[in-house]
Image (tube, rainbow, N blue to C red):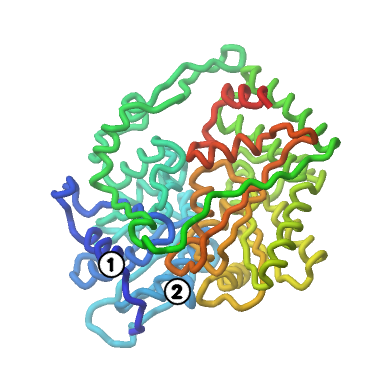
């Protein structure tokens, strides 16, 4: 078998906690369930792999089913660079279950041991939404199967198809482990489905309705001329009780606790891009239209409100036209059943205020350090593509690469290697990508600087993408820059509201129509 890197002390104790059936001292009495919520870049995947190997040695499991976001699946399964290949210390076979042809590989099976090797099946949430894709996994699963849910916030919506699929899979498996560096995600309601998947007995709430009645503050909303009524969550209550129930089943360590001498993450710096009069005119017209819509009573959900506001963010990023997908809210998630990750038709370039600021910022940094490497996160794929294209024109001497969901594996692997501290070469590099589909589970500590041209509305995405340049491999303080657009006379835009909420660790995606109308009227 291969030699692997020694574990850090927190990883040793984490593995011990995972493999222990219960821990009455912490109040964990329901056996074989845990949410490992270590802060990003502390090696949750490594701990899961080591724990599975230990349970296999004890004869308690013989199979691991891993479900991860599509953009993270290769982090587990790749035959050359995946973490199962890197960290497994027992005979292992792996099946990467994906759309198209499944891929398999083996590790250490040539030893000829009488015991069957530990089997991994690695798939993604987007795939198992479909019944015909889920059925083969259900047939494989049994009480000796360990279920690992990576980035478990992907199953925080109790009504989503992928959450329902995971509920079915969980009932067939034995031990269950969830991995998530931001367990509460965008609001306390995100914890309900994650805990219910582990065990319904943790929260004592069997249904989402019961959970909301106990912990949510709801007000009635009437839309569509009084023809549709629903309860809208406006706040949360009884959080001390919720924390008390959840805490025994969550293990969380922070970067500062584990590596107190690690270079710090610096406070973010705001860079301002001033819109031209023409861009501001288009923005203002769209804003006034959005306010009228949000106040009309036609908007029935926070998701619809967010889609409207997202169009304003699109304008500040230099684009206009098209209709954002309500299924994925404009992300380039290739698993979205509504849009398939295809940019909305009719989208066209409007202006380049943020783009020009970004190009000038890169020039300034390169003047300071010719080996400068950075990540430029964008909310929109077209925005990231334009950054790379324009850098190729203005700075052909600086390599520029794209990172987004749905890329060919070889392309994605090349980007990962270019910013991984163990494989990055000398010289400058700019990687531009979409934070939602590119900002999970990657080690980009070869860069110590990050520029956010525009932001996803998800707090989880903001925190996850920001953590890519942190970790024990980082040698320099991590520097963050946020670009916000303002009007030609200093007027505030939606960018100011979004970044203020994200920095305050507040949810943006769940802001109600009524609240957005109030916010936009104040610009």
Determine whether 227 is above or below 125 in the image: above
Instruction: Examine the image and state in which quarter residue 246 appears.
Output: top left
Res 44 visible: no
Res 57 visible: yes
The single residue placed furthest to the top in the displayed view is: 226
Few, some or many residues within 10 Å of mark 1 (<14, 14–19, 20+): few
Residue situated in front as seen by the camera: 459 or 230: 459
Residue situated in front as seen by the camera: 495 or 309: 495
- Total marks shown come to 2
Determine whether 59 is above or below 278 in the image: below
Q: Where residue 442 sits: x, y (%)?
A: 50, 63
CA distance for labels 1 and 2:
32 Å
Q: Secondary structure at mark 1?
A: helix
Q: Where residue 415 sits: x, y (%)?
A: 60, 69
Instruction: Examine the image and state in which quarter residue 362 appears.
Output: bottom right
Residue at the (39%, 79%) spot, across then down = 106
- Give the numbered dot on residue 104: 2
For label 1, the residue is 9
Q: Quadrant of the C terminus?
A: top right
Few, some or many residues within 10 Å of mark 2 (<14, 14–19, 20+): some
Q: Is residue 41 left or right of residue 393?
A: left
Residue situated in front as seen by the camera: 16 or 302: 16
The single residue placed furthest to the left in the displayed view is: 24
Q: Where residue 255 sits: x, y (%)?
A: 39, 57
Contact (Cβ within 8 Å) of mark 1 with mark 2: no
Residue at the (65%, 63%) spot, across then down = 431
Q: Quadrant of the N terminus?
A: bottom left
């Amino acid at each position: 078998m291969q030699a692997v890197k020694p574990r850090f002390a927190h990883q040793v104790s984490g593995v011990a906690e995972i493999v222990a059936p219960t821990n009455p001292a912490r109040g964990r009495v329901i056996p074989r369930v845990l949410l490992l919520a270590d802060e990003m870049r502390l090696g949750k995947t490594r701990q899961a792999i080591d724990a599975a190997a230990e349970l296999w040695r004890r004869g308690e499991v013989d199979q691991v089913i891993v479900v991860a976001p599509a953009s993270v699946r290769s982090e587990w399964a790749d035959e050359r660079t995946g973490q199962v290949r890197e960290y497994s210390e027992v005979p292992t076979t792996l099946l990467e279950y994906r759309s198209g042809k499944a891929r398999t590989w083996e590790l250490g099976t040539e030893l000829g041991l009488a015991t069957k090797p530990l089997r991994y099946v690695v798939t993604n949430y987007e795939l198992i939404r479909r019944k015909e894709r889920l059925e083969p996994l259900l047939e494989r699963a049994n009480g000796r199967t360990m279920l690992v849910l990576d980035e478990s916030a992907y199953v925080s919506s109790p009504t989503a198809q992928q959450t329902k699929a995971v509920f079915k899979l969980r009932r067939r498996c034995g031990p269950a482990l969830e991995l998530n560096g931001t367990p509460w995600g965008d609001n306390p309601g995100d914890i309900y489905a994650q805990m219910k998947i582990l065990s319904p007995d943790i929260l004592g709430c069997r249904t989402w309705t019961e959970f909301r009645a106990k912990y949510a503050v709801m007000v009635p909303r009437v839309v569509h001329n009084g023809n549709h009524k629903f309860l809208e969550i406006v706040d949360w209550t009884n959080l001390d009780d919720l924390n008390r129930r959840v805490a025994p089943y969550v293990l969380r360590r922070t970067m500062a606790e584990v590596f107190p001498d690690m270079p710090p993450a610096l406070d973010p710096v705001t860079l301002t891009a001033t819109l031209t009069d023409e861009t501001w005119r288009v923005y203002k017209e769209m804003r006034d239209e959005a306010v009228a819509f949000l106040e009309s009573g036609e908007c029935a959900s926070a998701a619809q409100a967010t889609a409207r506001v997202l169009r304003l963010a699109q304008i500040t990023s230099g684009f206009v036209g098209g209709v954002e997908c309500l299924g994925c809210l404009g992300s380039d998630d290739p698993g979205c059943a509504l849009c398939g990750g295809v940019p909305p038709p009719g989208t066209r370039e409007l202006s380049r205020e943020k783009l020009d600021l970004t190009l000038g910022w890169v020039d300034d940094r390169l003047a300071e350090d010719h080996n400068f490497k950075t990540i430029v996160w964008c909310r929109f794929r077209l925005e990231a593509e334009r950054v790379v294209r324009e850098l190729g024109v203005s700075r052909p001497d600086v390599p520029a690469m794209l990172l987004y969901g749905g890329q060919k594996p070889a392309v994605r692997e090349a980007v990962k290697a270019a910013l991984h501290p163990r494989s990055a070469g000398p010289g400058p590099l700019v990687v531009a990508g979409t934070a939602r589909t590119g900002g999970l589970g990657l080690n980009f500590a070869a860069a110590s600087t990050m520029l956010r041209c525009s932001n996803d509305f998800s707090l989880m995405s903001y925190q996850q993408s920001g953590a890519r340049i942190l970790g024990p491999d980082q040698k320099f303080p991590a520097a963050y820059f946020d670009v916000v657009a303002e009007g030609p006379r200093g007027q505030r835009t939606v960018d100011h509201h979004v970044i203020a909420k994200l920095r305050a660790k507040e949810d943006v995606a769940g802001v109600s129509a009524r609240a957005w109308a109030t916010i936009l009227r104040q610009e």
